[in-house]
Amino acid sequence: MKKTIHTREVSAHAGKTVTLQGFVHALRVQSKIIFLILRDVTGTIQVVIPESSHLFEHAKNLSLESVVRVAGLAKEEKNAPGGVEIHPDTLEVLSSSAPELPIPVVTLKGGDETESPTRFDFRWIDLRKPEKIKIFKIWTEFEKGFRKFWYENDFIQIYTPSFMSTPSESGADVFEVDYFDRKAYLAQSPQFYKQMAIASGFERVFMVGPVFRAEPSFTTRHLTEFTGWDFEVAYIDSHHDLMDLEERMIISGFQAVSHTFPEIALPIPTQPFPRIPMVEAKKILRRLRVISPEEHDLSPEEERALSVHVTKEMKHEFVFVTDYHKSMSAFYHMRHPDDPDRARRADLLFRGVEVTTLAQREHRPEILEKQAKEKGLKLEPLADYLNFFRYGCPPHGGAGIGPGRFIMSMLNLGNIREATFLPRDVKRLNP
Amino acid sequence: MKKTIHTREVSAHAGKTVTLQGFVHALRVQSKIIFLILRDVTGTIQVVIPESSHLFEHAKNLSLESVVRVAGLAKEEKNAPGGVEIHPDTLEVLSSSAPELPIPVVTLKGGDETESPTRFDFRWIDLRKPEKIKIFKIWTEFEKGFRKFWYENDFIQIYTPSFMSTPSESGADVFEVDYFDRKAYLAQSPQFYKQMAIASGFERVFMVGPVFRAEPSFTTRHLTEFTGWDFEVAYIDSHHDLMDLEERMIISGFQAVSHTFPEIALPIPTQPFPRIPMVEAKKILRRLRVISPEEHDLSPEEERALSVHVTKEMKHEFVFVTDYHKSMSAFYHMRHPDDPDRARRADLLFRGVEVTTLAQREHRPEILEKQAKEKGLKLEPLADYLNFFRYGCPPHGGAGIGPGRFIMSMLNLGNIREATFLPRDVKRLNP
């Protein structure tokens, strides 16, 4: 590979000859001088080509977004953006862009951004905007922070299959696949398999992978395929142990982002996060006069109102809503021994958006069967799952974390699609 | 969570009262004493219950593989395995195992292991064997090593979708999904999307996720779903830059495994790895009298013979086979400018198994179209992909890495299923 530097490094090379590579971000052609703004993954730099340069005619005909390699003197110039500019000796076109871009990379001052469906049709051009690439740099750091916690706390990484022989839970909202001479179903969650790892004695596992939801949803926070981070831990006493652990993961993730991107001024949350039982949450919401048709669940409006309340009263951007009514719990959620109508489940809200859900699992097979029947489920499709508990399985629980929703809330993006590299929804399978 | 320790830590607590949790690995009931071997994720420990103990009758009736919590004195005892044993005051059954196990966890000395299909039917019991959990601990460390390299070298992590609107390349070997009112296809590789990230200016990306292959294969190294690690890098000069980078990733991965698991005595490979053009490889194989029907590809037998040869002659366990004939290259592989019949592709063999494949991509749209037509492909299903190159795209290339095959070869497992948490193949979708 050619010895090159990034635009971010140019000022450290002032007075020297350097080589840079990147896209033609902007081109201002005047009669006696051309200003070319070169953009790479770290930023932009001004390249100046005077009429006297042998490159003048060549540069004049460049199209925006072509990829070029430029070599020349890095010269301090107080009028240049960043105080330094490039005076090139060579200018090589590595890839020529068609003269008309389908969507602009640079939005003119005061101009509207292209509407979202068109931007996503040309996502690879949309993502060239520096603030959009940055979303994925932040996501990389965020996961690095979570992994730091997992690695330091003896979690084992597993990869669970997407293909299942029977739909988990109910058959609704599951994608069906032609699998040789039969049908397979895409996993809606790695949960059953994480639990299997616990039955295998793994004690602490984490998992990163796609989850598939065939829900015909058209909201700003649902996709048909999204990335899930999951963990599962043995020998817990209750869902409060899971909240303790998850808090530490989140703090580790926030610290990593904050360290690398101080400019986004991300407040690091403090432990413990507020934990409010659903019954209490409903009382608070009634006092706030935020009403919902659901007695045992929170509407998006209620989630936002509760978050605003907690931020104001408890100075915290997170809140666990705990102890869901059994009607809102899955058959595999462990119920409270002293309150059998309540499950050891909690959802985490961050700035009004549900970002994770966790629960202690029921590990006693006879109770699992009873609760499955109570929910009206057939035991036969659950046979594999129920078997995990028949030959010794530690008490355990875990969580599913939606990193896309976290990033959406963290950066105030307004739509999970903006936090997703290539979103997939009911209408979108391209590009 | 209860304050507990792991079996590995017991000797450091000799003379103190400790609490441990785990499976009943073995139980030897004698008239005056019971020896219980407790197994957790770190190892095993002997628990001794004399006839005089109030726990004697209780312990007698334990079933193998039940999960228990034991508290008692950690006592030095030179006859005990590891020099220390537990004398319990309490013994609590957290989960009771059915008395008959479908497959044994402890294989008797001299006894055969259960045959593989049955073991995979009961994979969650099969994985309880300490040497099997260890496979996944090693995998976790191996990825940690790769990530160390990616993080330190400014790679951005992306998650690419599994759902595609059209099959990539040919339609064969692709899984079809019912996607609302139409069909979707599961990605056979994230490659096209990684390349899109390069067109978006990401410069260096990595990706971890499932890949799906609807191949009716019944070999020891093919699965219908497996975990792929992928990377893609801009501004390379040729596939040799990719080999340089990949070597550094592999060394980082091997160092991480070797550091945490010194007992597996993993030799760290040295840079550069041997690189042998296919034409040369075929000459060597002819000299070794290993014959293949294929002029331009290596049979598994040839791969093994070449690896043995390289290990002997060049003292290296890896070998890149480079510069494949165009008949063995994809339409998107860049050809050699000075030898248009050869592509800038290389496959990496490790101990006779192909573990990665890499190539410089063709980024000039007119040549891509020409090569696609030459291969007899229709351009229409490739329209999205071809568009990635029309508005400026840096020269680039990347690799797909099969961590399962790496682990299989590293640990000499003989079958990729043994390195896979829950294998999926033509016949297997359960558990």
Image (spheres, coloured by chain):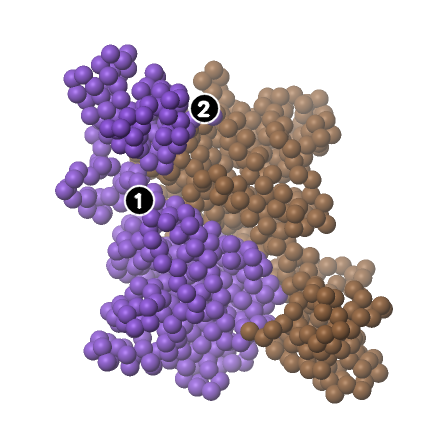
Chain colours: A purple, B brown
Q: Residue at x 33, y 48 (%)?
A: A263
Element type where label 1 sits in the image: helix
In the rendered image, residue A24, in percent from the top left (x then y), is placed at: 28, 28
Vertical position of residue B304 compared to residue B344: above or below: below
- Per the image, the residue denoted by label 1 is A132
Q: Which quadrant of the view contains residue B410?
A: top right
Q: Residue at x 32, y 77 (%)?
A: A281
Can residue A75 be seen at all in this image of the molecule? yes
Q: Which quadrant of the view contains residue A253?
A: bottom left
In the rendered image, residue B203, in percent from the top left (x then y), is placed at: 40, 35
Can residue B47 be seen at all in this image of the molecule? no
Element type where label 2 sits in the image: loop
Chain on which label 1 sits: A
Q: Which numbered tag is attached to residue A2?
A: 2
Given residues B181 and B367, the one toward you in this image is B367
Residue farthest to the left? A110
Left or right relative to A358: residue B42: right
Residue farthest to the front? A78
At label 1, the amino acid type is Lys
Q: Residue at x 36, y 37 (%)?
A: A42
Q: Residue at x 38, y 72 (%)?
A: A274
Q: Quadrant of the N terminus of chain B?
A: bottom right
